[in-house]
Amino acid sequence: MASEDAAHPFDDPTADPAEIARIAAEQIAERTGVENHDIALTLGSGWGKAADLIGETVAVVPATDILGFRSPAVPGHVGTLRSVRLPNGKHALVLGARTHFYEDHGVRSVVHGVRAAAASGAKVMILTNGAGGIKQTWSPGTPVLISDHINLTAASPLEGATFVDLTDLYSKRLRDLARDVDPSLDEGVYVQFRGPHYETPAEVQFAKTIGGHIVGMSTALEAIAARQAGMEVLGMSLITNLAAGISPQPLSHEEVIEAGRSAEPVISDLLARIVERV
Ligand code: 8IG
């Protein structure tokens, strides 16, 4: 039987996600030799090169060696956890194995990386993604800061009567710090759809009407879990395409990948300069 069919801890509904994150953090410390990480980053489409630029790689671990992680379903995503020592001496944990909500493994799997990072000591969570842009002024390849989100997945990583304040979820301090590095950075409200289909033009107009500027499939649920864990969140989107109907051209996955590829060196360098200051 293929290894992806092996039993997974989140297949057991009685499993405690916090306990699985705690064990994962122990395994990360053991496998990387780094007892505590200060910062964690999830690198989405177009952002992967940042892992090489932020500092010196101390250890690379296949994500599936760590409890609760799954191998990524999206081609171009690297299924590794990487420990990087920053020039300022801090330790960053780079999560290269995102599980998307549309994979139908449940929200516990979606946010496990964030929870494992928090259990590893990380106080700052940097979430990056490739996304569609609603503002016409954003050409493909433009990085933007996430100022807030609208969660249209009808799901939450919080279980039971857990009330978490999401005011200033996307830290003003970190957004200001990012703009110190690049004053041209624009910001917008990220709208998370379930996917994996892209939106219809009517859905994009809906997202715009309710106050959205960016459409994506990943970050809102992760940000909520990060805030629950007490982390400070920085969210950044690489606009790889104008959202459906905003531009006359239809969306193509190949164009999305290509926009990410050509922007990657620039935005990865930008992210490295931001991480240095966090
Ligand atoms: I890359 O246009 C990328 N991811 N929902 N819509 C949504 N997610 C995306 C898009 C997009 N482009």
Image: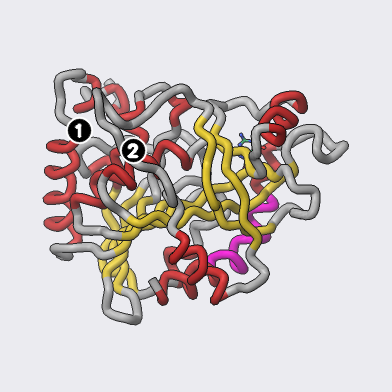
Residue 243, how many percent across, how many down? Answer: 72, 38
Q: Is residue 133 magenta?
A: no
- Which residue is rendered at x = 49% and y = 57% of the image? 48
User: Which quadrant holds residue 198?
Assistant: top right
Q: In this view, does 194 lie to the left or right of 18?
A: right
Instruction: Examine the rendered structure and indicate whether residue 46 appears above or below residue 196.
Output: below
Q: Residues within 10 Å of mark 2 (few under 14, many from 20)?
A: many
Q: Distance between the residues labelled 1 and 2?
A: 9 Å
- Colour convention: secondary structure
The residue range painted magenta reads: 258-268
Image disc number at residue 111: 2
- The residue at 56%/29% (across/down) is 193
Judged from this view, the residue extending furthest toward the bottom is 88
Q: What numbered label is drawn on residue 17?
A: 1
**Quarter of the picture for ligand 1?**
top right
Q: Can residue 126 be seen in this view?
A: yes
Q: Position of residue 86 (x, y in %)?
A: 33, 75
